[in-house]
Every structure is written in C-alpha cells, then in structure tokens.
Amino acid sequence: MSAKEQAILFRIGGLGDLLVALPAISLVRWGLPRFLLSLVGRPEYGALLKWAGLVDEVLSFEDARMTAVFGGSKEVASGGKSAADPLVSWLKKYSLAMGWLNRPGQWPSREWWQKQGMSQADFTAYESEPDVPMSWFFFDRTRDFLEKIGTMAGPAAFDLLFDKCARLTLPSGLRKKAVADLDLRELKPGQRRLVVHPGSGGRAKRWPLTNFIEVIRRSGQLGLPGVLVTGHAETDLEAEIEGLRLPDGWSKAARLPAETLAGLLSESTHYLGNDSGPTHLAAACGASVLALFREDNLPAWRPFGKTRVLAGPALAGIDVEPVWRVLQDLLAGR
C-alpha cells in the first residue's frame, strides 16, 4: 500500500463527543476503503472504533507530537511552524486530514496542512441549526467533502447510509466476554435486558437517582432483568447505590472499561439514561434507548438510532410516570 494512502482523523473529547462523530467517521471508512485511517483522540474510546474495523490505529491527543501541532500556538495556526520539526514531520506520511469540532476553534490552516504534503484537509465545526443534531451535521458536511474530492461512489440514499454508518458493530468475542465478565446470561431470542445508567458528567444533566430506582423497581415487578451501571463521572452516587437492594435479576456494575460497557450494551435490548457518553454508546450499539435531556442541550446532542428523548428545562421536573409510559412502549415494541 502506498504511503500516501493514509488519512489522519481528529476527534477530541469524551465518549459522547466521539460517538456523535461516529456516523461521519464511518462514512470516511466507507468512502476511503483503500486508506489506512489513524484516529487521534482518547485511546480508551477510540479503541471501540478500531475493534469495529472503522479505523486502523488510535493515537493519543496527549502525545507530544499532537502538542506540537495543536498546542494553541498562533505560530502553528498561521503556518509558521517549520515542517522540518521532527514533531511535525511525521505528518508527511498522510495525504489527508479531517477533524470534527463542537465549535469553531484555532486549528492549523489548510495552507499549513499543504506544507506537510497533504493535498486535502477538512475540519468541520458544528454550527447550531434548528432541529439538526451534531451527528447529522458532521455526517452531512463529511459527505459533501468526500463528494468534492471524488471518493463517494454514487448517490446512496442519505438516510439509509446514515443509519448504516451510525451503528457500532463489535466482534462477537468482545460482546460475549463482557457478558461473562459481568456474570450475566446470554439472551435468547425474545428475551430482554434493561441497562440503567443514572449518571452524567454534569450534575445538572442527571435525573434524580430516586426516580431511576423507582423505574428499576417497576421493571423488577414485570420480571424484566437488568444492570444498574455507574461510571467514573458519578462516583458520588456509588455510596448510595451500594446500599440499594435491587430486584431479583438485577445487578450493579461500576466503572466498567469502555469495551466491557460496549459489550454489555450490545448484548442488551433496552437502555435508560441521561445525556451522557453511555447513552450515545447504547444508541450506537443498537439498543432501544430512552434518553432524558435538558432542553438546552437539544437538538445538538440528540442521540441517533432507536432513541426516544424526554426533555425539560430541568431534569428534576420530569416525572416518573411519563418516563415509565415511554419505557413500556419501547418494551412492547411500539
């Protein structure tokens, strides 16, 4: 394979940030089948895309080489950094650079990338538009770019292509290992499992824990098994959760590695959670998702896939009853 058939992709931030760019990154994989794709971001999350076959390697954004390029230097952004610098010259092996940003920022100019030998560079910054989630915006602009450089093969149906690119398909071995590590049963056809994640990086984005517990109690009365999951961002909830007695068929899991959480979600049918990275992951893994959002975070961060969203000015104002009704509809396939 020619050294020029390589592209470097940039997506920084947490799990949710990466996953709203998943359809766009998948589209790059679809549109550039002969390229080796290097993803720059957080390795623990980028590894999910590598396991799914969407990228070929993952590079840490904290690498010294990235600091040389994106250290916030006006010199770099204006093209003043020498291409002979060994911390920059490694970019010579790439012919294309792409990135997706939540908002406009200071990134090296197109001219700077051309000095590194890249014939094409495209960095898309999200621009809030009515009813346009970030995932669709990134996907749309990426498609435009790939069509411009002549790599899109024919006018594929846009909606169908988005749905295909929005799925994170993990190896069966990884999914089975997650179920085994969590001491869970593999689901048989027709069986269901609900994953509940009551956390989020921001406390204002959390529905009250007592409400989640009430939903779990009602689910247990229906004989629906599930897993209550917490992560590193909500360690303050762990003490209260540790003392809870869950219904039969329910278990708890805390601070799971990204691959274990992804495997669990891929092997579960339903999910309930806040505006968080795991919620986006559940949608990408194909679960039927009920997501609880503050209105001011929509439409930008709306998850894709089989997702229903309930929103309000404040999450504490969302009552249990409408959440339970929508969850019942999802469980019934409505």
Image (spheres, helix red, strand yellow):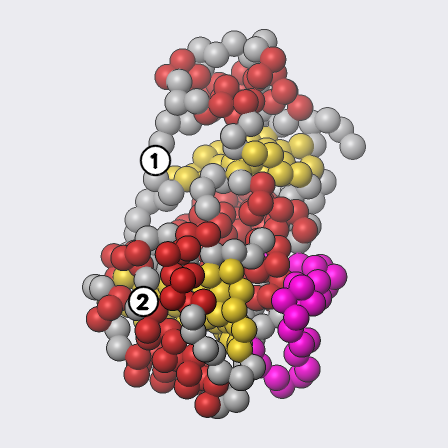
Q: Earlier in the sequence, mark 1 or mark 2?
A: 1
Q: Which mark is residue 305?
A: none
Give the position of the N terminus as an image quadrant. top right
User: What residue sits 48% from the left and 34% below the top?
Assistant: 122
Mark 1 touching mark 2, by CB under 8 A? no
Q: Residue furthest bottom?
A: 222
Q: Is residue 179 magenta?
A: yes
Give the prevailing secondary structure in the magenta stretch.
loop
Q: Amino acid at mark 2?
A: Trp
In this view, the residue in front, 292 or 184, is: 184
Q: Is residue 282 among the parts visible in the rendering? A: no
At x 69%, y 44%, the residue is 33
- The boundaries of the magenta stretch are 165-193
> Judging from the image, what secondary structure is the residue with disc 2 in?
loop
Q: Residue 236 location, x and y as percent?
A: 37, 56
Alpha carbon distance from label 1 to label 2: 30 Å
Q: Residue 202 or 26: which is nearer the viewer?
A: 202
Residue 325 shown left or right of residue 64 in the figure: left
> Disc 2 designates what residue?
207
> Percent position (x, y) of residue 233?
42, 52
Q: Is residue 300 left or right of residue 61?
A: left
Residue at left offset 60%, top offset 22%: 91
- What amino acid is at disc 1? Pro
Q: Residues within 10 Å of mark 1 (few under 14, many from 20)?
A: few
Residue 253 percent location from the top left of the image: 53, 64
Residue at (45% x, 42% y) in the render? 13
Residue 104, numbered circle? 1
